[in-house]
Image (cartoon, grey):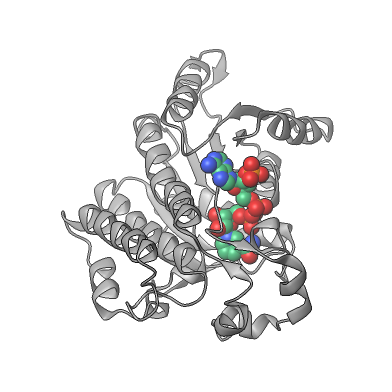
Amino acid sequence: MVVNGKKDQERYAVVTGANKGIGLETVRQLANAGVTVMLTARNEKKGMEATSLLRQSGLSNVVFHKLDVQDPESVESLAQFIQTQFGRLDIFVNNAGAPGATVDMDALMALNIDPKSWLSGKAANLVQGFIKITYESAKECFDTNYYGCKRVAEALLPLLQLSRSGARIVNVSSLRGELRRIPSEQIRKELGEIDTETEAKIGRILEKFLHDIKQDKLGGNGWPEMVPAYSISKATLNTYTRVLAKKYPNMCINCIHPGYVKTDLNWHTGMMTVEEGAKGSVMLALPPEGGPTGCYFDITKIAEF
Ligand SMILES: NC(=O)c1ccc[n+]([C@@H]2O[C@H](COP(=O)([O-])OP(=O)(O)OC[C@H]3O[C@@H](n4cnc5c(N)ncnc54)[C@H](OP(=O)(O)O)[C@@H]3O)[C@@H](O)[C@H]2O)c1
């Protein structure tokens, strides 16, 4: 059977925020595995350049489509494009991410923080003066990492439901979103329970954070100390992953910490290459039939939420 000129057994994937970093490498690895991949980016020029490079390297199964996950019209336009061109979707890798902070790069580099202190969060006090979180940067972070993911997932779910090979959603999260890293027991409890109220609770938690930052009351209210907006955005993304997995038991829907990868997002403090960082996303995008769902992975291993 042929759908819009494409073979029945072909698989179609969308990767968000794929003009660079882990996303670009995820596109490369999925395309190498024979998947037709939509490389998406909010910046048309950067996205088209990245696509051209992959196509010139022999990956003619990579196509570009513009996507700003914060913009509902842009999201709708991508869904329409997939509907018209392919008629369905098999894999959605929600990779786009915003750090939720601005940094004084020179000062951060001069601190020469060892990766262990960075990862454990022990460096929180050291970086306090150099990593600035404002109401605007926190809002952008939530609109990208949580609401952006949700927006794109909701638009693509009808197409994923038409998958013939079993739909997969991979939410690229972070170890910063692990519940044990959130000081507030109440927030840990609310994000740890999956029920019909969970999405409303997430909304209230994000609103409270924005309220607290506006009032300059982040300290002492139980929010994470290390990159707090980013940490909460990823914790809520993990919880949303579990909500989706419960709602769509016929799909494999998981979230992942890709590892500590050297990219723009962490101001190049990471240790791993993008090739290593994309491995987990690709593994979860191509699991065997009956693979895990509703789980959190630390690189390639199942871990505690
Ligand atoms: N690197 C790490 O160590 C690490 C660790 C844990 C989790 N992660 C996660 O891994 C994912 C990929 O990050 P990365 O490390 O590869 O960083 P990166 O190279 O900075 O890539 C981030 C990507 O997200 C895109 N993006 C930001 N806002 C967007 C929006 N509104 N719409 C569409 N795209 C948007 C960026 O586009 P522009 O180029 O236009 O800004 C960029 O393509 C993120 O979700 C990040 O949180 C990374």
Q: Residue at x 33, y 61 (%)?
A: 239
- Name the spot of residue 142 as percent of width and height, x first: 42, 53
Q: Residue at x 32, y 77 (%)?
A: 221
Query: Can the viewer see residue 258?
Result: no
Query: Seen from this angle, which residue lies furthest left?
Result: 196
Q: Is residue 56 rendered to the left or right of residue 125?
A: right
- Name the spot of residue 174 as percent of width and height, x first: 51, 65
Q: Is residue 178 rendered to the left or right of residue 299?
A: left
- Name the spot of residue 4 as percent of width and height, x first: 52, 13
The image shows residue 107, relative to residue 290, as above or below, that is below
**Quadrant housing residue 262:** bottom right
Query: Can the viewer see residue 219?
Result: yes
The image shows residue 36, relative to residue 84, as above or below, that is below
The image shows residue 305, relative to residue 122, as above or below, that is above
Q: Residue at x 47, y 47 (%)?
A: 144
Q: Nearer the viewer, residue 69 or 9?
A: 69
Q: Nearer the viewer, residue 76 or 52?
A: 76
- Name the spot of residue 30 as percent of width and height, x first: 64, 43
Query: Seen from this angle, which residue lies furthest right?
Result: 56
Q: Is residue 231 rendered to the left or right of residue 30?
A: left
Q: Residue at x 49, y 40 (%)?
A: 91
Q: Nearer the viewer, residue 305 or 235?
A: 235
Q: Is residue 122 rendered to the left or right of residue 193?
A: right
Quarter of the picture containing the C terminus is: bottom left
Q: Nearer the viewer, residue 35 or 104?
A: 104
